[in-house]
Amino acid sequence: MRINLLSSFTAGILITTTICGAVYFADKGDAPKVSAKTSEKTTSIKVQPSEEEMVENLVAKGYIVLPKAEYDKNLAAAKASGTKENVSEDKTPETTKTQVVLNITNGMTSGDVGYMLKDAGMIEDAYTFSTDIEKRGLQNKLRQGVFNIDSEMSLDQVISIIFKQ
């Protein structure tokens, strides 16, 4: 860089700084420089509603308000009736049979079928289903159509229905 160019740049910066400083200090502005201090003290008093007013407000909003003794009494009665109902119930577990209708269209893969079966609750993991299909060599033998699958069917039965053997 030439020395003339550098000194011209420095002179420009110096002039700009001088102008900005003059404008900054010469500006009188609308706001006064010294703020007037006023000493006003405000006192806030917090008013608590009475117990009756609180109950009325809660009841108006749809809440049920009970004294503690009445609440404990209702809770004990509910626990007692709950244990009586459990004793009278049968202990035999109910088995529910779930039937799933699978609509397999052109372009679907064994992974897609696995996700459909997982969403229906028929299998635990879609990835495991897909790898099992690949191990059996059936990944390209997926049949198109609508198939009814029951929850009582084994995995081998489901595969034999959906895939060509």
Image (cartoon, rainbow, N blue to C red):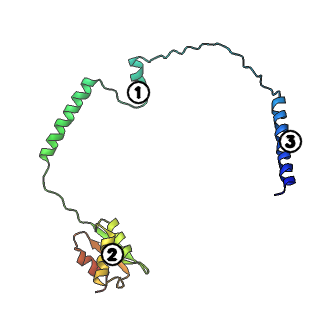
Question: Is label 3 in a helix, a strand or a loop?
Answer: helix
Q: Position of residue 153 (x, y in %)?
A: 22, 73
Point out which mark residue 58 bears: 1
Q: Nearer the viewer, residue 143 or 28?
A: 28
Give the total of numbered labels.
Answer: 3
Q: Quadrant of residue 99?
A: bottom left
The local secondary structure at tag 1 comes to helix
The answer to which of 135 and 29 lies nearer the viewer is: 29
Q: Earlier in the sequence, mark 2 or mark 1?
A: 1
The residue beneath circle 2 is 130
Q: CA distance from mark 3 to mark 2?
A: 77 Å
Residue 144 to residue 28: above or below: below
Q: Nearer the viewer, mark 3 or mark 1?
A: 3
Q: Residue at x 81, y 33 (%)?
A: 24
Q: Is residue 19 left or right of residue 103?
A: right
Which residue type carries mark 3?
Answer: Ile
Answer left or right for 41 relative to 148: right
Quadrant location, the C terminus: bottom left
Circle 3 or circle 2, nearest the eye: 3
Q: Is residue 39 left or right of residue 136?
A: right
Residue bearing the label numbered 3 = 15
Mark 3 Cα-neighbour bin, 10 Å: few <14, some 14–19, many ≥20: few
Q: In front: 115, or 102? A: 115
Residue 121 percent coordinates (x, y): 30, 65
